[in-house]
Image (cartoon, rainbow, N blue to C red):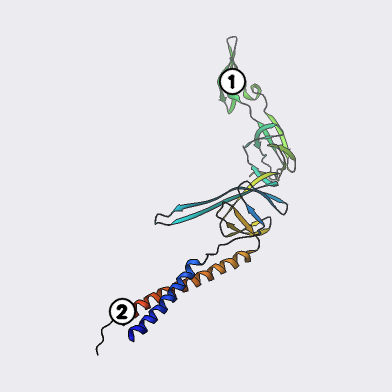
């Protein structure tokens, strides 16, 4: 009777364990999916958010071995857009060489306490001028603090003041607030100071933004949730609850599966214990 009862219980637990395992084996693991996201993007796709147009430069999903028998997945994507009226700034300091309205020169600021303008000076290349003059020495000399050029003509050597020998440098004066042509842009000259003169202009600027898996990104003032799929596409979804609801369903599925595994394992262990107990020798 004892063994018959044990056999019945063993069969019960085996059926219970097999049923639990059968549910585990036949259950489909849910995956995150977006049926109608705002944007589903592949490399090269263009899309608009507000009045700004974006281009998807690339989308990559790469699996790499982690060295322990598993794999890690790396997601990468870059968006690119152009700001047609980006603001650029520079500061021209004393001695900088710039080209303004086609004139190239060094920035020179007067020693006034509140200068309102600066000069672009095209310095004279004295070395080249002396080298090209067969009658002049290649270097100037200084007498009583004044520079002279040694000139020899018809066996007669004389000293010519450098200020007289060399041509006056070309100069262009630019006042603060002036709009000038600089590097192909209409550029506004800011307040002139001895520390430097700021200039600014507007021109197109290309910007790039990297996307991260399961993160948020703001495009043209609108926030999107970023999700990479397995087919080298990336989804931008503004309604985060779509993702949140599915991940909660997946977590619930995991909890149920873990419970079924527990039932299956416990049923098997219990059946084995019952079989062992049924065949223990009787003391009576």
Taking the spot 53% from the left edge, 71% from the top edge, the residue there is: 252
Compared across the picture, whether 233 is left or right of 220 comes to left
Secondary structure category for the residue under label 1: helix
Secondary structure category for the residue under label 2: helix
Taking the spot 58% from the left edge, 66% from the top edge, the residue there is: 246
Compared across the picture, whether 262 is left or right of 131 comes to left
Residue 97 or residue 185, whichever sits in front:
185
The answer to whether 76 is drawn above or below residue 261 in the figure is: above
Residue 48 or residue 166, whichever sits in front:
48
The answer to whether 248 is drawn above or below residue 222 in the figure is: below
User: Percent from the top left, x then y, of residue 132?
Assistant: 59, 18
User: Percent from the top left, x then y, of residue 205?
Assistant: 66, 45
User: Percent from the top left, x then y, of residue 153?
Assistant: 60, 12
Residue 130 is tagged as 1
Quadrant holding the C terminus? bottom left
Question: Nearer the N terminus, badge 1 or badge 2?
Answer: 1
Image quadrant of residue 225? bottom right
The crowding category of the residue bearing disc 2, from other C-alpha atoms within 10 Å (few below 14, some 14 to 19, many at least 20), is few
Residue 276 is tagged as 2
Quadrant holding the N terminus? bottom left
Taking the spot 65% from the left edge, 37% from the top edge, the residue there is: 107
């Amino acid at each position: 009777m004892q063994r018959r009862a044990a056999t019945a219980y063993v069969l019960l637990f085996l059926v219970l364990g097999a049923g639990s395992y059968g549910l585990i084996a036949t259950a489909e693991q849910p995956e995150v999916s977006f049926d109608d996201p705002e944007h589903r993007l592949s490399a090269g796709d263009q899309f608009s958010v507000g009045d700004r147009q974006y281009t998807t430069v690339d989308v990559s999903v790469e699996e790499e071995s982690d060295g322990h028998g598993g794999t890690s997945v790396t997601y990468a994507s870059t968006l690119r857009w152009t700001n047609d009226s980006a603001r650029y700034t520079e500061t021209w300091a004393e001695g900088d060489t710039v080209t303004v309205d086609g004139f190239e020169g060094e920035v020179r600021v007067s020693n006034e306490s509140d200068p309102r303008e600066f000069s672009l000076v095209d310095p004279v290349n004295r070395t080249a001028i002396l080298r090209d003059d067969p009658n002049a020495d290649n270097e100037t000399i200084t007498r009583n603090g004044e520079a002279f050029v040694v000139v020899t003509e018809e066996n007669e050597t004389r000293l010519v003041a450098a200020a007289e020998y060399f041509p006056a440098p070309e100069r262009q004066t630019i006042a603060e607030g002036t709009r000038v042509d600089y590097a192909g842009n209409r550029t506004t000259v800011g307040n002139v100071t001895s520390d430097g003169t700021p200039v600014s202009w507007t021109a197109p600027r290309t910007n790039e933004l990297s996307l991260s898996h399961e993160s948020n990104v703001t495009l043209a003032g609108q926030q999107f949730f970023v999700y990479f799929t397995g087919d080298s596409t990336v989804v931008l979804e503004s309604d985060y609850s779509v993702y949140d609801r599915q991940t909660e369903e997946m977590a619930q599925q995991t909890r149920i599966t873990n419970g079924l595994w527990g039932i299956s394992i416990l049923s098997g262990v219990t059946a084995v214990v019952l079989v062992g107990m049924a065949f223990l020798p009787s003391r009576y």
